[in-house]
Image (cartoon, rainbow, N blue to C red):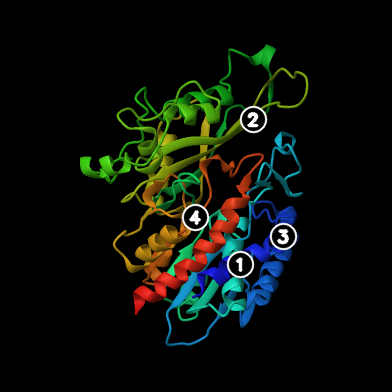
Amino acid sequence: MDSKAILTYIEDNKQRFLDELFDLLRLPSVSADPKFAGDVRKTAEMVKSRLLDAGCDKAELVETPGHPVVYGEKIIDPNLPTVVVYGHYDVQPADPYELWDSPPFEPVIKEEKIYARGACDDKGQAYMHVKALQAMVDTGSLPCNVKFMIEGEEEVGSSNLETFVKENKEKLAGDVVLISDTGIIAIDTPSITVGLRGLSYMEVEVTGPNRDLHSGIYGGAVANPINVLCTMIDSLTDENGHITIPGFYDKVEELSTTEREQMAKAPFSLEEYKSELGIDEVKGENGFTTNERTGIRPALDVNGIWGGYTGEGAKTVLPSKAYAKISMRLVPNQHSDEISDLFTAHFKAIAPDYVKVKVTAHHGGQPSVVKTDSLAYGAASKAFEEAWGKAPIPTRDGGSIPIVALFKEVLKVDVVLLGFGLDSDAIHSPNEHYGVFNYFKGIETIALFYKHFVELKK
């Protein structure tokens, strides 16, 4: 591979690469909301078209019971290694829109950052792979085969991807799965994610009286479901930040002192962390650092809570129902289905007699740990060294990519999490953004991964 030719190509095509990404970002591909279904499909069709433009021999939409998977491939020699790229073209809802400084689906660049929903998660990062392919093809530098699977349901649990992967094992056969849906420590401190937490996502409904009541006539005599729900939620963790669900920690992997010391080598400023978030103090499980709390320990959080009257002004109502969405982040050895069952049993058990409780399990996913002694990890490390001038630090990420464990189980290959986002990119929040530098440096690093992977495979 001619690395200088790749750099020159990227430099000469920067504006085009940005314009094309902006086209993708303008499409509100919100997989969670049916009203955006048409836009989700338009996005899939655009991704397919862009794969063909980048040099894929073929690209297609593979239908599922939900949103389609975009598959594409460039096979230059069946005897050469094959890199399988995974990404997703769907995005989180942009609500609340009023908290965005600019419209979420009208991308803009401010202070060298691309602001739009999906800029980092995951359109910007997935599109880096498309442009890396094009840079290699157009400069005659592609050293191996490449296959793409870009799905449209990651933000709602990838419920149809397992079937797709299992039914297309031969089509997806390769030597490594490459994913850019994670981040680095900082622009001057590259890192590679080697651990991801799993997820169990629940919804609870608490019902009191059979209808909304007048809070003056009935208040103090009838249980208020919102009050009860808040008390139940509060009991799910104790004063030490420990989750109180019986059996929750039975299979939690406990890292050794040596492993925790290695994690602590990653540069981290607690004061900068608090300042960036606008908080005076952090909170979490006692006995663990902030990075450990998000990387190697499980967590339980309320993602949404509602009930009663929430409109303008006042309405003196004692509501009939209250609801909450609750997610649990899991660590190695915890199983999503088992944790969902434990939560359901416990939440029903702590419900007082004056309310009824319904618990619904939504999507989940398994935690995953990536080997740092694999050939693929070595190639990623060398790519960072060449592009960034320093070796990356292995880190564990608090987020979840449920399909990582699936790929390792079904496709029987190593997975490399070659992400370039930053913790400050506000993914899933208003004003999501992605650094222009990260976007272009990511394209360069991805291309170099191919170079080093093929060299190490010889």
Q: Secondary structure at mark 1?
A: helix
- Looking at numbered disc 1 in the image, what kind of residue is underneath it? Thr
- Looking at numbered disc 3 in the image, what kind of residue is underneath it? Gln
The residue located at (30%, 29%) in the rendering is: 287
- Kindly report the distance in space between the C-alpha atoms of the residues bearing marks 3 and 1: 13 Å
Q: Nearer the viewer, residue 359 or 195?
A: 195
Q: Is 282 placed left or right of 422 in the picture? A: left
Q: Secondary structure at mark 4?
A: loop
Q: Is 334 placed left or right of 41 in the picture? A: left
Say which of marks 2 and 3 sits in front: 3
Graded by Cα atoms within 10 Å as few (under 14), some (14 to 19) or many (20 or more), the crowding at tag 1 reads: few
Q: Which residue is mark 2?
A: 307
Say which of marks 3 and 4 sits in front: 3
Q: Which residue is mark 4?
A: 419
- Looking at numbered disc 2 in the image, what kind of residue is underneath it? Gly
- Kindly report the distance in space between the C-alpha atoms of the residues bearing marks 1 and 2: 57 Å
Q: Which residue is mark 1?
A: 8
